[in-house]
Amino acid sequence: MPVADAPITNAFDRPATRWSSGHRGVDIASSLGTPLIAPDDGVIAFSGTVAGKSVVSIAHDDGLTSTFEPATSEMEVGEHVGRSRRFGFIAEGLSDHCLDICVHWGVMDASGEYLDPSLLVLPRSVALKPV
């Protein structure tokens, strides 16, 4: 998880179409200054402001991209970040998404399709069914 010991407070809600409304990620409980932890190896792909919101993105080695908002990082674009390593912090006041009580984590694959981040980190069970 990008935030240690924190629950998901708002689940992924895939939009019916790419341009429809929906929740293209999960919200994780956090507060200002909370450290952000890289969910997997990658490089800092973006760190800055988008539409008045503070955003950090990581391009992962497996082709996925994680985006965090509101977030800030002292790392440079192109700098490598290892799995489970701190790459940034929850930023102050540069988001209208969570009102300072969460961080939004979105994941996109190489084709631009949004994925449910919780499926990448939460435990799953596998069961065999008789034929």
Image: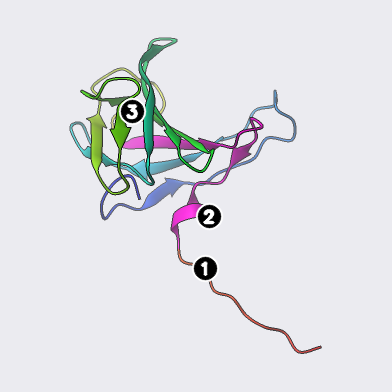
Q: Amino acid at mark 3?
A: Leu
Asked which quadrant contains residue 20, the reply is top right
Residue at image position (72%, 84%) is 129
How crowded pointer 3 is (Cα within 10 Å; few <14, some 14-19, many 20+) is rated as: few
Colour theme: rainbow
Mark 1 or 3, closer to the camera:
1
Q: Can residue 37 be seen at all in this image of the molecule?
A: yes
Residue at image position (37%, 31%) is 43
How crowded pointer 2 is (Cα within 10 Å; few <14, some 14-19, many 20+) is rated as: few
Figure quadrant of the C terminus: bottom right
Q: Please tell me whether mark 1 sits on a helix, a strand or a loop.
A: loop
Q: Tell whether position 117 is magenta.
A: yes
Q: Amino acid at mark 1?
A: Arg
Q: Pointer 1: what residue?
A: 124
Residue at image position (65%, 28%) is 21
Q: Amino acid at mark 2?
A: Leu
Up-down relation of residue 60 to residue 73 (above or below)? below
Who comes first in sequence, dot 1 or dot 2? 2
Q: Pointer 2: what residue?
A: 119
The magenta segment is: 101-122
Up-down relation of residue 77 to residue 22 (above or below)? above
Who comes first in sequence, dot 3 or dot 2? 3
Asked which quadrant contains residue 57, the reply is top left
Q: Tell whether position 72 is magenta.
A: no
Q: Mark 1 and 2 residues: CB-CB less than 8 Å, in contact? A: yes
* Residue 85 percent across, percent down from the top left: 24, 44
Q: Please tell me whether mark 3 sits on a helix, a strand or a loop.
A: loop
Report how far apart the C-alphas of labels 1 and 2 lie in the structure: 8 Å
